[in-house]
Image (tube, rainbow, N blue to C red):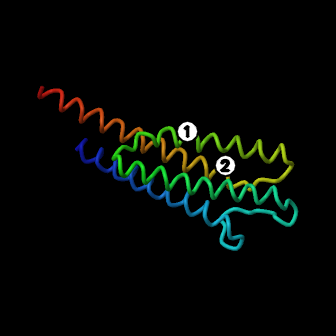
Amino acid sequence: MATNSMKSIKFLLEINFYISAIVLIAGGLLSVQGSYSIFEFNEDLYGALDNNLRMIMVYLATTEIVILVYCFFRKNFQVMILVGFFLILMIGSMEFYGEINTIEIDENFPLFFLYTGLSHILFGIMVNIEKTKANEEANKFL
């Protein structure tokens, strides 16, 4: 019974991680197009500063793609804990950016970064636990 519930939790965390990665990539890349963006950018009022925010989102999407490709090739997703931590730190960074430049930041940004960050952290922890269990099992037979 416990193994079935653990498998279910693992499956849900894995699906949630991939959904959050897709949301992060799509949210970042769609920020370039004003009509398709999931965030509100008031470019009429803020001009270049608002475009900088768009470029930050594109950079995050590109970085996520590179990190995912790296993790797939290495078959090691433990780095997602650190990625998630930095995504959560982006909440404060966005607030700071808006305050320093006196621009209004869309209220969806904190929820976006909280969701994607927590999803990455939980997935990384799950992968770390699985790797530790596999190492312990391998050491039993030595």
Tag shown at residue 117: none
Q: Position of residue 19 (x, y in %)?
A: 47, 58
Say the numbered circle drawn on residue 110: 2
Q: Which mark is residue 85?
A: 1
Of residues 129 and 48, which is closer to you in this image? 48
Q: Is residue 23 left or right of residue 58?
A: left
Q: Residue at x 60, y 64 (%)?
A: 29
- Residue plotted at (66% across, 49% down): 110
Q: Secondary structure at mark 2?
A: helix
Question: Residue at point 46% right, 43% down?
Answer: 80
1 is higher (above) or lower (below) than 65: above
Could you tell me which secondary element the residue under label 1 belongs to? helix
Q: Quadrant of the C terminus?
A: top left
CB within 8 Å, label 2 to label 1: no
Q: How many marks?
A: 2
Q: Earlier in the sequence, mark 2 or mark 1?
A: 1
Give residue 23's quadrant in the image: bottom right
- Drawn side of residue 115 relative to residue 78, left or right: right
Callout 2: 10 Å neighbours few (<14), some, many (20+)? some
Query: What amino acid is labelled 1 in the image?
Result: Phe
What kind of residue is marked 2?
Pro
Give percent across and percent down for residue 94: 72, 46
Mark 2 or 1, closer to the camera: 1
Near mark 1 (Cα within 10 A), the count class, few <14, some 14-19 or many ≥20, is some
